[in-house]
Image (cartoon, rainbow, N blue to C red):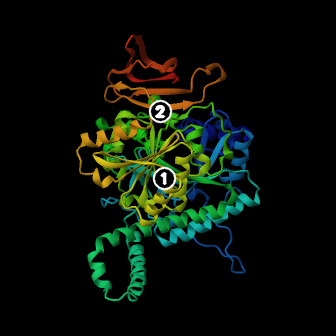
Amino acid sequence: MSNNILSNTINTINSLYEEDDENSNLNEGWFQYWKTSSSLWKNKLEKITKSRPLFIPINWAVHFTNNENISTSNGQDSNQYDFGKHSSDNNIADLVRLTNELNLNAIFLLPITPNPLIQNGGLPAPLAKIPAISEEGLMITVSTADEKLNRIYSFFDPRIYREYGKFTREFGQFIFDNNLNIHVALLNCGHLDKKNHFISYFEDYSSAFKNGLIKYMEVKKRESEQNFSAIPNVKHADYCQQNSLNLEAIKRTEFYEIIKDLYITASKDAVKDAFEGIIDVAFLGGSPFDIINRSIEKHEHSSRYFPQIMQTKNIDVLPCILLLPKNIKQNIIVRAVNNFLDNTSVQNKLVNLNSYEKDEFDFSPLTFFHLYQSSVANINAIDPWKFSGLINYLDKNYTQTYTVYSSTKNLCDDDLTYDKSYFFLSSHLNNNDFYTILKIFMNGGNAIIDTCGISTTFTKKLDAFFIENSIPLQRINYVAEVTLASIGQGKMILFNRDQLTKESFVKKHSFWENIISYFNIDHLKINHDNDVYFQWKGRMPFHTEIEFIEIRRAIFYNPSSYKKSVKIPKNKNFILLKTIDEQNVSINMNEKGLDIDLLPNSSVGLDFGYRE
């Protein structure tokens, strides 16, 4: 009898786990293992699509076993974290082996920022002392899918960094001791602000950040005074007074980057060969301002989040909808997010690509333009490509075919595709970047360089390169002065954005229209109603499609409550091959092209064969 009672009790507990919608969110590509009994892990993981990445965030707090440092008799610290020795529901080794056994593309995410999915941002409760503050002075708080509030705490608190070092070291030692075949990426959690800029939850204006910044600036001030004492006729006080605002902004950015790099370094050193890269994730609905919108029912609709989903591709971050309530996560928004989380999108963010088998016949994001800018903290974020008018031009004419990268760190030789166009800011280039640009150019690619703030050294190197290789230069005035160099298929274009920033929208548009025309990009023109969103993907043709150079897929979404239309003018170089995943859509072909009617909450994919 007692055995039956025990069995019934276990079954009841398990059924509660099964009925909890927040157990795993596997349909969205995430598995929160701490919300599910380990006895159910296999049953849940067996149901997911094996061809997609599976993100498994590590919950720092759930592995924390005590509130104070425990010392052994000889004075040495004992392990303070349990990764499965004492609790089967924390057993990371079992979870790794299970994902490997099921051939899942599992990436374990080690947080380097607060995680909004978890109470206290994932911090163990004893460490949650100093709340993080936004630039607007708001206490950073996130509303979860079940309408709970998670407060975010500052990672600039020195106590948190010290404990984080211990946590990552023990996690790394656990991986080594258990000889785990695990892929670990560092998770940078953030949200999109009102201008759709990515803001990391690491960013903070709390007392912890300000106190650390003051100490940092004092150290830098002493170093600066020592340097200036060696320069005759220059008073350090006068110099600082003239440049105080600029210096403070620079030091604030420097301090932010230094502390952030400390967390990154601690994690990389801990996991060693298991390190795959850093993944930036934008949690939709995770802004402090979203709490207000989500409390007002009329503001809460899936269509409100579609501009953010589309923007994630443009700024090289991955979207996540785990914070959104169930009624918002309709099929259309889940489909859209999953289309952004394909293997190729994730692969491009990883250092070691052995997590996945690369297949050139898989659809991947279609990207014609790679835009690079400086790696600075978001607290001082500027958008030089937007100021020059390039972003607006691409949004209008080449929607969803460009990506802005925060730095050139991931621009490596093996990843270069020479039929693409690469845009650089000369003021932020190092020697490796400079020679990579020359290699792109010499191998038939397009390199566009904004010369604003270019150093004398790089100017001399460029001049020497052109002379040594006998490359003729054309100087043309398209609103701003442009220098054009060509060699074979390769093109290099130099311009100074200072000559553009004060020009009208029309003149900026004309400037970029002339520049882009040099690259002979053949692309389908799409006319669509407002609130219709779409993304582009591409792949190599199969052997049965040899008449085409490339297969391109356009996926359209109408998240609104109204019927919308799309018109695609006829183009002799693009042949409609098939439609996929039609949801409440009608497509009519006529002599002028395609007319697509999208009913509310509808979507459709169209495959086109491209030939010259």
> Label 1 neighbourhood size at 10 Å, few (<14), some (14-19), many (20+)?
many
Residue at 57% across, 66% down: 164
Question: Where in the figure is residue 477, as x and y percent of width and height?
Answer: 30, 46
Q: Residues within 10 Å of mark 2 (few under 14, many from 20)?
A: many
Q: Which residue is at the front of the view, 55 or 350?
A: 350
Of residue 411 and residue 323, the one placed in the foreground of this image is: 411
Instruction: Choose between 608 and 130: the one closer to the eye.
Output: 608
Residues at badges 2 and 1 in contact (C-beta under 8 Å)?
no
Residue 373 shows in the view? no
Report which residue position mark 1 lands on: 189
Residue 3 % position (x, y): 74, 40
Q: In this view, does 89 lie above or below 535?
A: below
Q: Can residue 424 be seen in this view?
A: yes
Sequence-wise, the earlier of marks 2 and 1 is: 1
**Residue 359's spot in the image, x, y percent?**
65, 35
- Residue beneath the point at 49% across and 68% down: 259
Where disc 2 sits, the SS reads helix
Q: Please indicate whether residue 215 sits to the left or right of residue 292 in the image.
A: right
> Is residue 242 rendered to the left or right of residue 105?
left
In this rendering, position of residue 92 left or right of residue 557: right
The kind of secondary structure element at disc 1 is strand
When asked about the image quadrant of residue 73, the answer is bottom right
- The residue that appears at 36% across and 46% down in the rendered structure is 196
Quadrant of the image occupied by residue 83: bottom right
Q: Name the residue under label 2.
A: 336
- 496 horizontally vs 160: left or right: left
- In the image, what residue type sits under mark 1? Cys
Q: Nearer the viewer, residue 71 or 358?
A: 358
Task: Find residue 588 and name its label.
Answer: none
Residue 150 locus on image (x, y percent): 43, 53
Q: Is residue 340 above or below residue 63?
A: above
* Quarter of the rendering occupied by the N terminus: top right
